[in-house]
Amino acid sequence: MAKRVTGHEIEKLIQLLAKVPGLGPRSARRAALHLIKKRDQLMGPLATAMAEAHQKVKICSCCGNIDTADPCTVCTDERRDHAVIIVVEDVSDLWALERAAAMNTAYHVLGGVLSPLNGVGPDDLNIKDLIDRVARGGIREVILAVNATVEGQTTAHYITDHLAGLEVKITRLAHGVPVGGELDYLDEGTLSAALRARTTI
């Protein structure tokens, strides 16, 4: 049994940090030590920011995004094209697309994908709200930006079927060769998708 070298409070900090994605036990110890060494400049402000986020963060009732306001900043931004909705699996996908800054549209966060094996059905996701949102009118296009997994594609087909007849254009992200990718290193599925989604030059 390993000896304890720190007090209970520090051990608890390390254990909690180790639960953050991307941080294992060793990284958590390094992060905890860095926070402790920078108590005034980093740990204090971080603790305050986390306490404020814990109190104020909420889920947007319109799109499912995470923010401190409801409706969220994205939904209330008048500069966006709210007639186009990009449907994503998770908030992290929304943030990734925003970093790319490719389109200035509205979003809809599903909160996951359909997965019968894991007991995730349509009622467990934010699908009904999406259908209701489109049914209210004013939506020109729905872009399905779900992952290219079996569950992601199943979810995309389910949404497409339930949006049929609502007079909205439904598109999905292209799949294929990534920018900077070399054909020799790509799997057969990616190459097949790239050939099917080929474009005219």
Image (spheres, grey):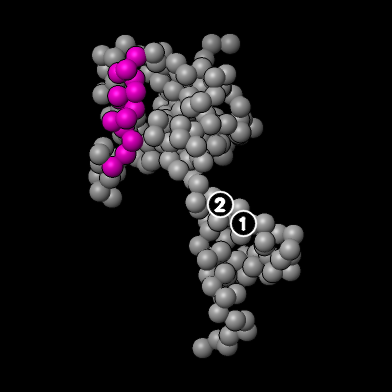
Q: Name the residue nearer the viewer: 188 or 154.
A: 154
Quarter the C terminus occupies? top right
Q: Name the residue nearer the viewer: 1 or 185.
A: 1
Spot occupied by residue 16 in the image (x, y as percentages of width and height): 52, 66
The residue at the point 54 percent across, 19 percent down is 78
The residue at the point 51 percent across, 22 percent down is 105
The tag on residue 16 is none
Assess whether residue 127 is covered by the magenta stretch.
yes
The residue at the point 28 percent across, 50 percent down is 118
The tag on residue 48 is 1
Q: Name the residue nearer the viewer: 113 or 61.
A: 61
The reply to whether the C-beta atoms of the residues labelled 1 and 2 are less than 8 Å apart is yes
Going by the numbered disc 1, the residue's amino acid type is Thr
**Left or right: 82 as drawn, with respect to 137:** right
Q: Is residue 81 visible?
A: yes
Magenta span main SS:
helix
Going by the numbered disc 2, the residue's amino acid type is Glu
Looking at the rendering, which quadrant does residue 152 occupy?
Answer: top left
- Element on which disc 2 rests: helix
Highlighted range, magenta: 124-137
Spot occupied by residue 13 in the image (x, y as percentages of width and height): 57, 69
Q: Is residue 157 visible?
A: no
The residue at the point 35 percent across, 40 percent down is 113
Number of other residues with Cα within 10 Å of mark 1, as a class: few under 14, some 14 to 19, many 20 or more: few
The tag on residue 52 is 2
- Element on which disc 1 rests: helix
Looking at the rendering, which quadrant does residue 146 occupy?
Answer: top left
Q: Measured along the vertical axis of the image, is residue 54 above or below residue 171?
A: below
